[in-house]
Image (spheres, grey):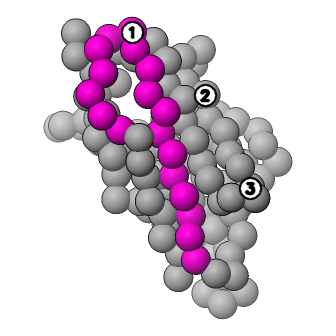
Amino acid sequence: QVQLVESGGGLVQAGGSLRLSCVASGNHFSINRMDWYRQAPGKLRELVAGISSDDSTYYTDSVKGRFTISRDNAKNMLYLQMDSLKPEDTAVYYCHGDLSSTLWGRGDHWGQGTQVTVSS
């Protein structure tokens, strides 16, 4: 099976920056698409940014121009550079992978989440 593990969360002042990382580990899989989601207290989980196998990207409106998603295919790594952070960006951020394998087919995989807190 495949594991997704996030890192890089923390406490930052408004206007600051953080870089989240996610590593996909396991054997015999390929990546179709990877995304960053976030969930704030009392709110639904929302898609923040995504990147497809052709490197096309998506950003939700509230983070456009501030966040940048990227990937390193050789290392099975996913990144989210977050600049000009705002208190409303405070949430648990989750790495999501749409992965395929000749052993188990295609499916969704999630990391355990990393907390991002932005103070005003």
Query: Nearer the observer, disc 1 or disc 2?
Result: 1
Image coordinates for residue 5, horizontal then vertical, percent: 44, 59
Q: Secondary structure at mark 1?
A: loop
Q: Is residue 41 above or below residue 16?
A: below
Residue 15 appears in view: yes
Label of residue 73 in the image? 3
The residue singled out by tag 1 in the image is: 15
Count residues near mark 1 (Cα–Cα under 10 Å), then give few for <14, some for 14-19, many for 20+: some
In the displayed structure, would residue 48 be above or below residue 105? Answer: above
Q: Secondary structure at mark 3?
A: helix
Nearer-N-terminus badge (1/2): 1
Give the SS element for disc 2: strand
Compute the Cα span from label 3 to label 1. Answer: 30 Å
Outermost residue toward the right?
A: 54
Q: Amino acid at mark 1?
A: Gly
Tell me which corner region of the image, top left, top right, bottom left or bottom right, holds residue 41: top left
The residue depicted at 57 percent of the width and 41 percent of the height is 79
Q: Amino acid at mark 3?
A: Asn
The residue shown at (26%, 28%) is: 11
Q: Main SS of the magenta segment?
A: strand
Label 3 and label 2: CA atoms lie apart by: 16 Å
How many neighbours does mark 2 have within 10 angstroms: few (below 14), some (14-19), or many (20 or more)? some
**What residue do we see at 74% from left, 55% from top?**
73
Place of residue 56 in the rendered image (x, y in percent of width and height, measured from the top left): 76, 39
Q: Which residues are magenta?
A: 9-26
Distance in Å between CA atoms under marks 1 and 2: 15 Å
Q: Which residue is mark 2?
A: 68
